[in-house]
Image (cartoon, grey):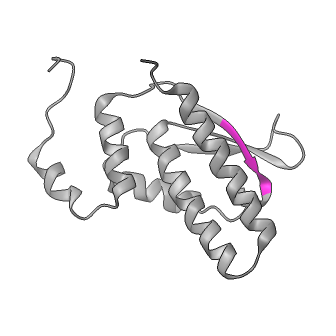
Amino acid sequence: MSTSRRHIPPARVVKVGRLLWSSVLCVLLELEGMAPDPLQFKIPKRAANVVDFLALRRRAREAGLRGDSIEANERHAGPANVRITCRPPMGLLLIEHLQRIAALAEQKHDFDLLIAAAGAIKGAFDALDRVRPKD
């Protein structure tokens, strides 16, 4: 095992039992130091309008993530898009949030929102693929 990996404190291990699986993945990515560079991707404005960015930041802090910032900016994103800038662990939390939005949109038969959420999820996954270390 390399010396660059940090020791997981016992308090974090106990806390993992209460976190959702995506939060566990975020913590692991944070500990492994995946992609210090931020993600940048576009999502449809329709999906961005229903994302609760404050709840995402709060959830990241509860999961113990450093750098829990996520920015949504309409500049240079096109007329129907919003540019998202965040770190990879926050991107995973956003994907999970968008999946919940898509499920609710499907239940309510709001197919415009469902399509927008699916496009946003794809954009986030593509951004994660771009920063993933190549083997």
Magenta region includes residue 130: no
Q: Quadrant of the C terminus?
A: top left
Secondary structure mostly taken by the magenta-highlighted segment of the chain: strand
Residue 27 quadrant: top left
Residue 50 quadrant: bottom right
Relative height, residue 128 to residue 24 (above, below): above
Residue 101 quadrant: bottom right
Q: How many marks?
A: 0
Q: Position of residue 115 (x, y in %)?
A: 76, 61
Q: Is residue 119 toward the left or the right of residue 52 in the image?
A: right
For the view shown, which residue lies furthest in the front direction?
135
Q: Is residue 39 toward the left or the right of residue 49 in the image?
A: left
Q: Residue at x 40, y 28 (%)?
A: 34
For the view shown, which residue lies furthest in the left direction?
10
Q: Position of residue 1 (x, y in %)?
A: 14, 21
Q: Is residue 120 toward the left or the right of residue 79 in the image?
A: left
Relative height, residue 36 to residue 85 (above, below): above
Q: Residue at x 45, y 26 (%)?
A: 35
Q: Position of residue 25 (x, y in %)?
A: 35, 46
Relative height, residue 77 to residue 20 (above, below): above
The residues colored magenta run 41-45
Q: Residue at x 21, y 62 (%)?
A: 17
Q: Residue at x 72, y 66 (%)?
A: 114
Q: Position of residue 80 (x, y in %)?
A: 86, 50
Relative height, residue 5 to residue 106 (above, below): above
For the view shown, which residue lies furthest in the right direction?
79
Along the viewing direction, whichever of 117 and 30 lies nearer the viewer:
117
